[in-house]
């Protein structure tokens, strides 16, 4: 089963959601991404701003 993953571009911080890492960023053309783990996603959702 394929699962949706979230990736953040290290150059401009744009977030992508896909089943695999994109080859390059559509905004800054960087090829460097950081995987956003599920714990980190949950933290941002439940944290007061």
Image (cartoon, rainbow, N blue to C red):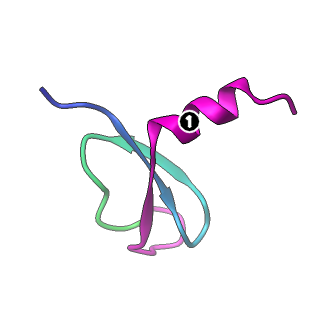
- Secondary structure of the residue carrying tag 1 is helix
Please tell me which residue is depicted at 36% across the width and 68% down the height of the picture.
Answer: 24
| Residue span colored magenta | 26-49
Classify residue 25 as left or right of residue 42.
Answer: left
Please tell me which residue is depicted at 61% across the width and 66% down the height of the picture.
Answer: 12
Estimate the x, y position of residue 34 in percent, counting from the top left.
45, 61
The image quarter containing residue 32 is bottom left
Mark 1 highlights which residue? 41
Estimate the x, y position of residue 22 in percent, counting from the top left.
31, 58
Q: Between 25 and 43, which is closer to the camera in this rendering? A: 43
Please tell me which residue is depicted at 87% across the width and 33% down the height of the picture.
Answer: 49
Q: Is residue 48 above or below residue 6?
A: above
The image quarter containing residue 37 is top left
Say if the magenta span includes residue 21: no
Say if the magenta span includes residue 40: yes
Classify residue 40 as left or right of residue 33.
Answer: right
Estimate the x, y position of residue 6 in percent, counting from the top left.
42, 43
Q: Is residue 33 above or below residue 14?
A: below
Q: Between 17 and 1, which is closer to the camera in this rendering? A: 1
């Amino acid at each position: 089963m394929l699962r949706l993953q979230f990736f953040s571009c290290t150059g401009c911080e744009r977030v992508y959601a896909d089943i695999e890492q994109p080859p390059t960023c559509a905004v800054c053309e960087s090829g460097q991404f950081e995987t956003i783990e599920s714990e980190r996603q949950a933290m941002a959702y439940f944290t007061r701003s």
